[in-house]
Image: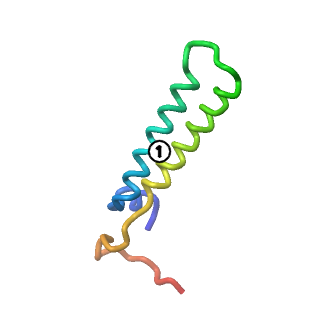
Amino acid sequence: MNVLERAQAPTPKFFKVLRSIGLIVAAVGGAIVTVPVALPVAVVTIGGYLTVAGGVLSAISQITVDDKDKPEGSKEAPDE
């Protein structure tokens, strides 16, 4: 299963919730980084970390698939 097939396959409910949380965290981090007032360096750094962490969480959650709902016509090498 390649990356495009994984991204289009059904995602389990738990990971849909995690994906949404990741998007929210990334949005909060982006808002902190781009705020038009001067903030302490530590706050801006934390905002950058939140943006990256939210993006990674969302991406990983999106490519997690439910094996039970895998299409029957898919050809995948057996695990050895």
Q: Residue furthest bottom?
A: 80
The quarter in which the C terminus is drawn is bottom right
Mark 1 belongs to which amino acid? Gly
Q: In the image, what residue occupies the spot 29% across and 76% down?
A: 72
Image color mode = rainbow
Is residue 67 depicted above or below 16 in this figure? below
The quarter in which the N terminus is drawn is bottom left
Of 8 and 43, the residue lying toward us:
43
Residue 4 found in image quarter:
bottom left
Q: In the image, what residue occupies the spot 33% across and 71% down?
A: 70
Q: Residues within 10 Å of mark 1 (few under 14, many from 20)?
A: many
Is residue 55 depicted above or below 4 in this figure? above
Q: Residue 5: x, y in percent?
A: 39, 61
Q: Residue furthest right?
A: 41
Q: In the image, what residue occupies the spot 55% across and 21% down?
A: 34
The residue carrying mark 1 is 22
Is residue 17 depicted above or below 70 in this figure? above
Q: Residue 10: x, y in percent?
A: 32, 61
In the rendered structure, the answer to whether residue 5 lies left or right of residue 35 reads left
Q: Residue furthest top?
A: 37
Q: Residue 53: x, y in percent?
A: 57, 44
Q: How many marks?
A: 1
Residue 23 found in image quarter:
top left
Q: Residue 75: x, y in percent?
A: 38, 76
**Circle 1 sits in a helix, a strand or a loop, which is it?**
helix
In the rendered structure, the answer to whether residue 19 lies left or right of residue 37 reads left
Of 66 and 28, the residue lying toward us:
28
Q: In the image, what residue occupies the spot 50% across and 83% down?
A: 79
